[in-house]
Image (cartoon, grey):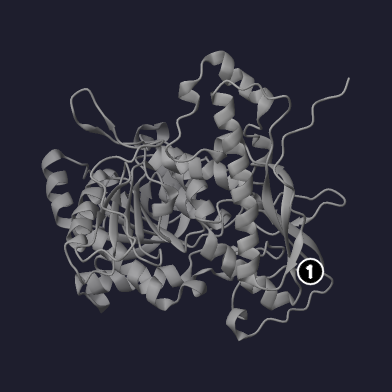
Amino acid sequence: MTLPRPHLPPFIAPMRFSDADAALAQVMRIYEGSIAHLRQAMQGFLAGSEMDGHVRACYPLVRLQTETVSRTGGPEGAGLSYGFVEGPGRFETTLTRPDLFASYYRKQFQLLLQNHGVELEIGTSTQPIPVHFSFAESDHIEGTMDATRRARMRDVFDLPDLAAMDDGIANGTFEPRAGEPQPLSLFTAPRVDYSLHRLRHYTGTLPEHFQNFVLFTNYQFYIDEFIALGRAAMADPASEYVAFVKPGNLITYRADPAPPGRPKAQDGPLGGQGAHAVSDRGGIRLPQMPGYHLVRADRSGITMVNIGVGPANAKNITDHIAVLRPHAWIMLGHCAGLRNTQQLGDYVLAHGYVREDHVLDEELPLWVPIPALAEIQVALEQAVADVTGLQGAALKSILRTGTVASTDNRNWELLPNNQPQRRFSQSRAVALDMESATIAANGFRFRVPYGTLLCVSDKPLHGEIKLPGMANHFYRERVDQHLRIGMRAVELLRARGLDQLHSRKLRSFAEVAFQ
């Protein structure tokens, strides 16, 4: 029996490039052809056409082959911790969404060409694109099919394969089989696509809106203040930010004449996974971890995400934001103060973490230290000084540097025999929360610079628990200041130079080339 031949787009064999822009253009050509092929086939499938074979299209790939450990790069990339392979061999990775990652890919290509003096190969890989990842944002295809037709999709198209999406490269556990190339990037194209879809679902905004600096919080009060600051920025024609985006992809543009070609401001949800839904009572139902974006033209603005309470959410969202390769993420939230000398409203700058969150124990063993990153620490301390106007001893009276313990047990105080308290005391922890160690550990794991600045909202070991009146007063007094400190830290990091943020502390001695 002869099986029907698969339906494939025209194959584009690997070609060599010594120019980053030309290499990127070839990536776009391959990707767009593959996506167009899948979408056309899907339209026919939805119309009832019966395919006489499997429909397939594959991701583009980039390959580098070098025979020497020496690097030829000039001064531009000499101080960077990325942009080069560690030794001779064949290295490659699959690529996706060149429209979204164009500037990122171009930079990685330029550095590889500079540092190794060999050409890059761009061609079609053998890694199929799952048909779900070819859908446009406005497509809701599966909802138009009955159960029988949906089941038939598996026979006709490639569906997401979790075996192609594991984090072995990032975890440092990946071992290529004999004859296989070594990886160029932490993430394969299917892994990236998977996370892009998850981001839409969890944050209610498109990946295109995410900025290169991300603030996480565990309280809605911070989001309320961020929205107010976003509105104020949009009312200021001199603002460095050009747009403010809320869940549902609701976009407000800065109050100045629209440049040619800029889309009009949206006055309602754009649709898509994770967009706002209108409840039966006429209100807005937010996604699980709503995201808000103060957009700069160069994408070095600020994204803020309310991750809610608990380490599971913290791991989940950072697993997905990591594929966007942000320049830094910082946790701003509330914590329990563990020292009697602390006052409500004091700040804690984490320089170490006790990891009792348990959500990353398999991917990042507890024996792996999570170091403080000097660039982030200095920026956060300076931001506290700038916003509060305090210096010297006065600054130290409200800002304490120390270890933060993160637990997955919200009611740790109720465990018998004070066991958690004893451990936290032995660790010299000064503050306790449920998310900060997870955010930092996943930053370390994914080579994303990280930091933590918390604000003491209660002192349960010393009888100062949250009461309604105290909480309301505390939030009014501190949330706005705390958020402004986080935003000021981003300004300082941006001014320092983005490339210098990606510390060698985050890179192993056998590291992928892509940042």
Question: Percent position (x, y) of residue 136?
Answer: 48, 40
- Of residues 428 and 146, which is closer to you in this image? 146
Q: Quadrant of residue 461?
A: top left
Residue at (21% x, 49% y) in the render: 224
What's the residue at 40%, 59% (across, down)?
211
Out of 500 and 101, give the one closest to the viewer. Answer: 101
Quarter of the image holding residue 383?
bottom left
Q: Amino acid at mark 1?
A: Gly
- Closest to the observer: 79 or 416? 79
Residue depicted at x 22% and y 42%: 465
Q: Secondary structure at mark 1?
A: loop
Residue 242 position in % (x across, y down) = 29, 63
Q: In this image, 49 relative to 173: left or right?
A: left
Q: Which residue is mark 1?
A: 87
Residue 453 lies, with reference to residue 308, above or below; the image says below
Q: Is residue 314 visible?
A: yes
- Position of residue 165 measured from the top left corner of the image (x, y, whole percent): 64, 41
- Report the residue that reaches farthest toward the bottom: 75
Q: Nearer the viewer, residue 110 or 434?
A: 110
Residue 69 % position (x, y):
79, 74
Image: 276 above or below 184? above
Q: Residues within 10 Å of mark 1 (few under 14, many from 20)?
A: some
- Residue 362 is at least partly visible in this image: no
